[in-house]
Image: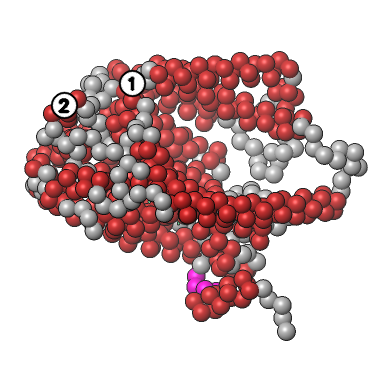
Amino acid sequence: MSKESLSSRVSNWFKDRLGLDDLPLFKTPDYMFHVNEWLGALVAGAFFYTVISGLILLLYYNPEAGYDATETIINTVPYGSVFLYSHLYGSYAMIILAYIHMFRNYFTGAYKKPRELLWIFGVLMLVLTLGASFLGYSLIGDVLATSAVDVGAGIISSVPQLSFLLPILFGNYDSGDFTRVLAWHIILVALIGFLFVFHLLMAERYGMIPSRKVKPKAPAVYTKEEDQKFNPWWPRNFVYMMSLIFLTWGFIIAIPNALAYLNGLPQELDPFLNPKPAPPPSSPLAAQVTTYPPWFFLFVYKIADFTSDVVLFLLIGVIIPLVYLLLVPFIDRTDELHPLKRRVFTGIGILMITYLVQTSIWGDIQPGIQVSVAEQVLAYLPPAIIVAIGMAFLPYREKGSTRTKVPMFKKAQFSSPIAVLLFMILAMLMAGAATLFLASPSPLSAAIFLPILSLFVFYAKALTPVAIKAMPQGDSSAPDSTSETINSTDVIKLERKKRIATYMIGVLLIMSAIIAADMWTIPSTGFESTMWGIDLGLLFIMLGEAISLYHYVVYKKPNESYE
Ligand code: HEM
């Protein structure tokens, strides 16, 4: 009789009953079990969380009295504040992760053949995500939300041909009735879900883009024969995905509840990152609130300060970047995937990120202050020049030959005592610049802080391997190792790490059980319930970490490394 373990019998039962091996699901090579390759799964995790928490909130939300309904959910519905705050942060996480996912795919060239349509659906999903988040933010009904809708409505009504859209989109929001806004919020989320099905089907069909070492040119897909050698979706992919989703959920729940528990944030970040609502527009306190747009639209609102011509504003801020992103698979026609072999597109990508961050920070620091054309040129030309020079002169090195080539800076340059001293000075400068930036954020303090930060990160990265090498590494008397001896020591090391990981799983599960027991003692409403939210978040983080360790213990092979 075969000695199949209980877990593999259960696993096989599911695989068999669900016919998982027959589904067109991507088989994953070992080296792809790295979070970089799974950013889409993180976005999907955040999306599912917002849908689940949103459906719970929908049971209690009354769109005809938006602000009062929000207050009722926070103050009287059991765990209402936990779900409300984490729903808000779930959408924030989704936006940030979708940007990271998009730009990662942009720089890897994952928009190229055969993934063009997958990319286009992604862009549409990002637009819908921003729209759904804006409408959801408006449902709070506080002074921030109402003023955000006011500005949005103002932009639309300033194009006479579009004003007919106003009642259709926003209804009677100015009298506190958010029925129409809620309807659109749900419609957009449903559309994201609809597009996601196709996005995922295509991602599974073509698989994640292989390492450039294996497939340096488009179309980058594994052949059917290659595919057969990889890990089937069930159970390894599933286990890995669950660990990532649990971790994502954990942070989405824990962070806003911790912020609410600590009762707010530093003043500079307060208006738009605080999960708690501001006063309603009718309250006398509303006059004291600086009205900000939601942070993810700060850049659009700042561009509105560049020109009074709304059509021009829409072109610069929305239409041109969007059309570019939609069409890039058809503009960048070469089969090159390396970012330095398609320098123009790489440069445009870097500039898009720079301008997005720069304009958002500007919008935060100087909201609603008109900007002359000269100031615009002064702000946007230098990054363009720096990127253009970088793209023109950055040397391209063939993959594979990189290790044998002389590095740009020799490691020794970073390991001398003077270099370490310089690094310490740089670290102190960085701390000073960070404090200056946080204490008085302005374009000047940002201009001081950001270059020092980049230099610090660059230097720290260069110094880390030297520092690790300098640390005692155990058996240094071992003779020069052949590849075989490396393999056997690798196996022993891995076994040791796996044993530690197994103990850690036990510790995490015991801690999770303690936290779960503690959660029963926390009141379900009122201020303390945010502590329940923190616990729930921690529980997900611990379970996510435990699953990740389980994945490591059960599936990690000795020679598996990320490429
Ligand atoms: C907004 C919600 C989005 C969700 C839920 C989502 C989800 C996913 C998932 C689950 C995958 C499978 C592989 C992985 O886990 O990375 C994937 C792949 C992909 N997504 Fe998205 N995505 C979203 C947005 C976007 C955006 C904005 C873009 C780009 C404009 C994009 C472009 C792609 C591409 C090109 C791939 C294939 C990646 C590869 O081959 O390595 N997605 N997405």
Q: Determine whether 426 is above or below 470 in the image.
A: above
Query: What residue is at 15 percent from the left and 39 percent from the top?
Result: 153
Q: What residue is disc 2 on?
A: 287
- What is the span of residues highlighted in magenta in the rendered image? 20-24
Q: Quadrant of residue 5?
A: bottom right
The secondary element bearing badge 1 is classed as helix
Q: Which residue type carries mark 1?
A: Val
Query: What residue is at 52 percent from the left and 52 percent from the top?
Result: 514
Q: Which residue type carries mark 2?
A: Ala
Apparent side of residue 83 relative to residue 485 in the rendered image (left or right)? left
The secondary element bearing badge 2 is classed as helix
Query: Closest to the observer: 315 or 463?
Result: 463
Q: What residue is disc 1 on?
A: 377
Q: Determine whether 541 is above or below 222 in the image.
A: above
Which numbered dot is residue 131?
none
Query: Closest to the observer: 360 or 179?
Result: 179
Apparent side of residue 20 relative to residue 266 in the rendered image (left or right)? right
Query: What residue is at 48 percent from the left and 18 percent from the top?
Result: 433
Residue 229 percent location from the top left of the image: 65, 66
Residue furthest out toward the front: 521
Query: Closest to the observer: 518 or 332?
Result: 518
Q: Quadrant of the N terminus?
A: bottom right
Local crowd at mark 2 within 10 Å, few (<14), some, or many (≥20)? few
